[in-house]
Amino acid sequence: MQDKITIKEAYAAMYAYLKRLYEVTGSNDLGGFLGSMSLLEDGTPADPGVWDDWLRAVQQAKHGQVDLTLGIPDE
């Protein structure tokens, strides 16, 4: 498997993963989010803010600013 992918390929991978979760769960929230992520004919997301949020998330990941540990809040 190739170690590096483009930002657009990573976006497509995230979309495919979330789409599969939607197929399994039927979550209306997830379905709505996928709609906003879907690309229009010009290649931009239906909700332009999604791409900005995605780029911000990519930068956070590149700079080690994403906490991937399971965080269970104390009660």
Image: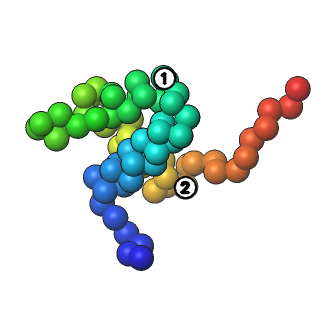
Q: Where is residue 57 in the image (x, y as percent from the top left)?
A: 44, 43
Quarter of the image for residue 7 reads bottom left
Q: Nearer the viewer, residue 69 or 30?
A: 30
Label 2 belongs to which residue?
64
Q: How far apart are marks 1 and 2 (CA)?
A: 31 Å
Return the residue found at the far right. Answer: 75
Residue 69 visible within the image: yes
In the rendered view, does 72 fall on the left or right side of 49? Answer: right
Taking the spot 51% from the left edge, 30% from the top edge, the residue there is 26
Residue 51 percent coordinates (x, y): 31, 37
Classify 50 as above or below 16. above
Q: Residue 28 carries which label?
A: 1
Does dot 2 land on a helix, a strand or a loop? Answer: loop
Label 1, residues with CA under 10 Å away: few <14, some 14-19, many ≥20:
few
Q: Which amino acid does label 1 sit on?
A: Asn
Q: Which amino acid does label 2 sit on?
A: Gly
